């Protein structure tokens, strides 16, 4: 699987639903899902996802995702994410939007924006807690806010 974003999503889904104790085991599960990846790439992916290994009561170990990597609400609107505390604010500089999130949420929210707002958004760039939203030509701030289901009051 060449698409890194999709691969990271598959790894996250596996770790949420399956008890995985080693990279070899995870590589085997990925291979069963037709997701061929090298051990080195998997190691980098686990580091990027901030996966930790925790001991179990039987002496074995289990890979776990950090708490902020838990699945976001399925409705996917930014309003829902705000109500869950993931999105903290959105401001504009010219036509560019800057979304501030809790640490660790920016990539997932940017991915959602990129996949659900293709008519309005050319693309996003995400860090750990900040997203740059780049609107398409002719799309206004109000269009972006409406698309994201956010109502902001004017600042004084």
Image (cartoon, rainbow, N blue to C red):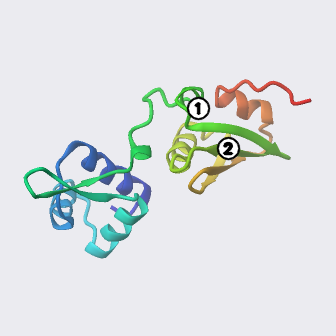
From this view, report whether residue 19 is shown above or below residue 46: above
Residue at image position (44%, 45%) is 68
Q: Quadrant of the C terminus?
A: top right
Which disc, if any, is residue 109?
none
Lower sequence index among marks 1 and 2: 1
Q: Nearer the viewer, residue 34 or 146?
A: 146
Mark 2, Cα crowd under 10 Å, few <14 / some 14-19 / many 20+, is many
Residue on which disc 2 sits: 99
Residue at mark 1 to residue at mark 2: CA–CA distance: 10 Å
- Quadrant into which the N terminus falls: bottom left
For label 1, the SS is helix
Residue 153, horizontal then vertical, whole percent:
81, 24
The residue sitting at 31% across, 67% down in the picture is 42
Q: Mark 2 and mark 1 in contact (Cβ < 8 Å)?
A: yes
Other residues around mark 1 within 10 Å, as few (<14) / some (14–19) / many (≥20)? many
Front residue (pair 60, 120): 60
From what the image shows, is residue 89 above or below residue 23?
above
Side of 45 relative to 37 (left or right): right
- Residue position marked by numbered label 1 in the rendering: 78
Instruction: Look at 66% across and 45% down and name the residue there.
Output: 100
Write the residue at 32% across / 70% down.
43
In the rendered image, residue 86, in percent from the top left (x then y), is placed at 55, 37
């Amino acid at each position: 699987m060449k698409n890194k974003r999709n691969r990271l999503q598959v790894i996250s889904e596996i770790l949420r639903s399956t008890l995985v104790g080693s990279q070899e085991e995870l590589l085997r599960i990925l291979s069963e899902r037709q997701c061929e990846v090298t051990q080195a790439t998997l190691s980098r992916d686990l580091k990027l996802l901030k996966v930790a290994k925790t001991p179990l009561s039987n002496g074995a170990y289990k890979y776990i995702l950090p708490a902020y990597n838990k699945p976001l609400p399925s409705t996917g609107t930014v309003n829902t994410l705000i109500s869950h505390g993931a999105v903290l604010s959105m401001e504009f500089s010219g036509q560019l939007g800057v979304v501030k999130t809790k640490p660790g949420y920016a990539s997932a929210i940017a991915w959602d924006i990129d996949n659900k707002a293709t008519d309005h958004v050319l693309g996003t760039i995400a860090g750990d807690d900040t997203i740059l939203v780049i609107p398409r030509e002719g799309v206004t701030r109000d269009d972006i806010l409406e698309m994201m289901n956010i109502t902001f009051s004017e600042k004084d």
